[in-house]
Image (cartoon, rainbow, N blue to C red):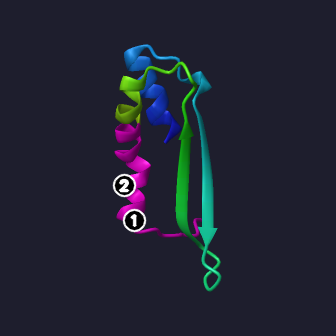
Amino acid sequence: MYAGIASYGRKFELPVEAITMTLDTTKSEETRLINKMDFQVKFPVDFPPQHKQSILKNMNACYVKKHLYDPPVVTVTVVE
């Protein structure tokens, strides 16, 4: 998702280096798999406010995130 922030920043010549992003996850006790991901984005104080919502929209359109909603078929093959 940070790639989306970086590409948006390049497009509009914004100082995205100071934007931080953290990820909190929650695991299912039953399956021990992650069942919730919470990304938190922190903008620097002087970041142009008119671009914040657009960056969040860009992140929500993330290609990887979309795959989590509609996961691909995964196969494992032994090759000799």
Give the mark toward the camera: 1 or 2: 2
Say which residue appears at 62% left-offset and 86% top-offset: 30
| Location of residue 24 by image quarter | bottom right
Quadrant of the rendering where the C terminus is positioned: bottom right
Residue kind at label 2, given as amino acid type: Lys
| Location of residue 41 by image quarter | top right
Question: Is the residue marked by circle 1 packed among few (<14), some (14-19), or many (20+) residues within 10 Å?
Answer: few
Question: Is the residue marked by circle 2 packed among few (<14), some (14-19), or many (20+) residues within 10 Å?
Answer: few
Where is mark 1, residue-wise?
71
> How far from the left and from the top, in percent, is residue 52?
41, 31
> How far from the left and from the top, in percent, is residue 33?
60, 74
Where is mark 2, residue-wise?
66
Name which of mark 1 and mark 2 comes first in the sequence: 2
Q: Is residue 13 left or right of residue 38?
A: left
Q: Residue furthest top?
A: 13
Q: Is residue 50 left or right of residue 18?
A: left
> How far from the left and from the top, in percent, is residue 68?
42, 61
Say which residue appears at 62% left-offset and 45% top-offset: 22
Q: What stretch of residues is rendered in magenta? A: 56-80
Q: Give the camera-side residue of 76 and 40.
A: 40
Q: Give the camera-side residue of 54 and 11.
A: 54
